[in-house]
C-alpha cells in the first residue's frame, strides 16, 4: 500500500448558484437605530441612554449641562 501525505479539506459538494446565495443573504442588512423622544426636552435619543441635550436619565439629572447651569 502506498501511503500518501494528503491533507483533506472541507470542499462543497456542488456550486451554490448566485440566486441561492443572494436569497440567503437578503437578511444581512443594516437597519437604522431605534430612537425615542426624551420625556423632558423632546430631543430624539437612543433608548436607555442619557439625553445629551438636557442630561437626564429616567427623570433624574445625571449630567450637568451648560443649559442647567
Image (cartoon, rainbow, N blue to C red):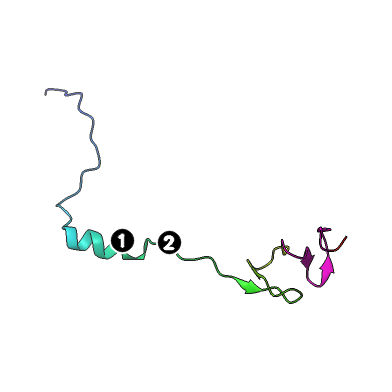
51 or 31: nearer the eye?
A: 51
Secondary structure type for disc 2: loop
Q: In which quarter of the image is the N terminus?
A: top left
Please tell me how crowded label 1 is: few (under 14), some (14-19), or many (20+) other residues with Cα within 10 Å.
few
Which mark identifies residue 25?
A: 1
Region of the chain picked out in magenta, as a range: 52-67
Given the current orientation, which residue lies at the most extreme right position?
A: 69
Please tell me how crowded label 2 is: few (under 14), some (14-19), or many (20+) other residues with Cα within 10 Å.
few
Alpha carbon distance from label 2 to label 1: 12 Å
Dominant SS type (magenta): loop
Residue at image position (72%, 64%) is 51
Residue at image position (70%, 73%) is 38
Which mark identifies residue 40?
A: none
**Does 55 appear in magenta?**
yes
Q: Is residue 29 left or right of residue 38?
A: left
Foreground tag (2 vs 1): 2
The earlier-in-sequence mark between 2 and 1 is 1
The quadrant in which residue 19 appears is: bottom left
Q: Quadrant of the C terminus?
A: bottom right
Q: In this view, does 55 lie to the left or right of 11?
A: right
Residue at image position (79%, 66%) is 56
Coordinates of residue 25 in the picture (x, y in percent): 31, 61
**Does 7 appear in magenta?**
no
Given the current orientation, which residue lies at the most extreme left position?
A: 1
Which mark identifies residue 30?
A: 2
Q: In this view, does 39 lie to the left or right of 13?
A: right
Coordinates of residue 55 in the picture (x, y in percent): 78, 63
33 up-or-down from 9: above or below: below
Coordinates of residue 47 in the picture (x, y in percent): 65, 68
10 or 55: nearer the eye?
A: 55
Amino acid at each position: 500500500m502506498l501511503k500518501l501525505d494528503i491533507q483533506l479539506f472541507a470542499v462543497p459538494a456542488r456550486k451554490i448558484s448566485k440566486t441561492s446565495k443572494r436569497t440567503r443573504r437578503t437578511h444581512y442588512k443594516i437597519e437604522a437605530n431605534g430612537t425615542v423622544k426624551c420625556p423632558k426636552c423632546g430631543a430624539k435619543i437612543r433608548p436607555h441612554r442619557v439625553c445629551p441635550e438636557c442630561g437626564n436619565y429616567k427623570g433624574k439629572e445625571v449630567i450637568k449641562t451648560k443649559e442647567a447651569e
